[in-house]
Each structure stands twice: as structure tokens, then as C-alpha cells.
Image (cartoon, rainbow, N blue to C red):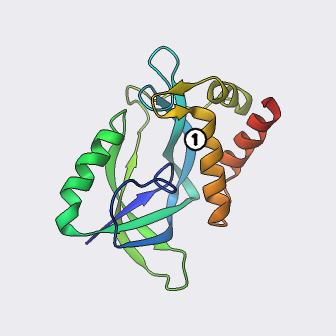
Amino acid sequence: MQWIFGYGSLIWRPDFDFVARRPARVHGWQRRFWQGSHDHRGVPERPGRVVTLVAADGGHCDGMAYQVTAADSARIFDALDHREKNGYQRRDLELHFLDADGGTAPGIVYLAPEGNHAYLGPAEVADIARQIAHSTGPSGRNIDYLIDLAAALRAMNADDEHVFELEHAIREHL
């Protein structure tokens, strides 16, 4: 069995079979809209912005962990490698489960490190919001990704100042 940690669209749209799903947290990381999306929520000449994890002392990121069987893992990772191909890499992290059972387990996460070909990095909230508001790609509008992520985090009772601040900025532009 293997755990996969989702902190972006994997929270509400994993698109793979799993045997268990549990809310989880990773420590030492924060979710940020610093990764360009040239293939899903934008196009090469007008990239959208999607989330990645950035190292942050004392930080954490809440998301959803999915347990997959060993028999399914190769197929699932092949599909995720394709889905997360635009600058993302697999990384091993310790997951801290947030449900009543608690505990920890090793897990795999996809993150887009600084310096990858699609990395956009930090920017002012208003600038990120403007870029999100005007980007659309093969997977749909970038604004829908942000709003769906904020809704998924609220459904988990997860607080993410960065996401909610961007959502507020976007809603002011609607």
C-alpha cells in the first residue's frame, strides 16, 4: 500500500481508484500559487497559475491523502506523472493524519520546485489574481481551479490564508 498526498486539484478530483481517503497535513511546507500552468489552466503564451509546495520553517499544508494498492500504484503513478508533467517532481514526505484516528505514514507528493521550466514564483496578490482571472486552458478556467480549491479546503475545515486571500481578490473582480 502507498499513500499519495494531494494539496491542489487532487483534493476534489483525484481521478484514480483508492482504498482509503484521509485528511492529512505535511509540516515544513506551504501551498502557493507560484507554478505556471501551460498545459491545464493556461496555454504557453498565457500561462495560468496553480499551486505547488514551498519550504517554510514552521509552516504546514493541509490536503487529502489517498491510499492505493501496490497492484494499482504503477498505473496510478504513470497517470499522475502525465497529469503533473509541467514541472512537478515526486517527493517523499511524512503525512500527519487529521482525522480521529490520527497517526503518521510516509507518502508521496508532487511538487514543482523553484527553477523548473514553468515556475513563476511569488508575486503580489493582485497580480496573481489578475493572471488567474484571465487564464484558461484545456482543463478549463484558472479561476475555477482557485474557487474549487478554496471550497475543498473549507469542506475540510482547512485554513489557508494564501488561497483565501486570492479567492477574495478574485471575487472582487467578478
Q: Residue furthest right?
A: 172
Q: Is residue 158 visible?
A: no
Query: What residue sits 42% from the left and 55% below the top?
Result: 14
Q: Quadrant of the C terminus?
A: top right
- Indicate left or right for 70 with 107 as reference: left
Q: Residue furthest bottom?
A: 101
Q: Nearer the viewer, residue 85 or 31?
A: 85
Query: In the rendered view, would you say 70 is above or below 74?
Result: below
- Indicate left or right for 108 with 123 as reference: left
Q: How many numbered marks are there?
A: 1
Give x and y (percent) for residue 135: 58, 24
Query: In the rendered view, would you say 78 is above or below 133?
Result: below
Quadrant position of residue 59? bottom right
Query: What residue sits 69% from the left and 25% below the top?
Result: 130
Q: Residue furthest top?
A: 45
- Indicate left or right for 147 with 57 as reference: right
Query: What residue sits 27% from the left and 47% below the top?
Result: 79
Q: Secondary structure at mark 1?
A: helix
Give x and y (percent) for residue 153: 63, 58
Mark 1 Cα shell of 10 Å, populated few (<14), some (14-19), many (≥20): many
Query: What residue sits 79% from the left and 29% below the top?
Result: 173
Q: Is residue 174 visible?
A: yes
Query: In the rendered view, would you say 127 is above or below 103?
Result: above
Dot 1 corresponds to which residue?
Answer: 145
Q: Quadrant of the N terminus?
A: bottom left
Query: In the rendered view, would you say 166 is above or below 70?
Result: above
- Indicate left or right for 83 with 169 as reference: left
> Which kind of residue does numbered mark 1 sit on?
Tyr
Give x and y (percent) for residue 25: 51, 66
Give x and y (percent) for residue 141: 57, 32
Q: Nearer the viewer, residue 140 or 132?
A: 140
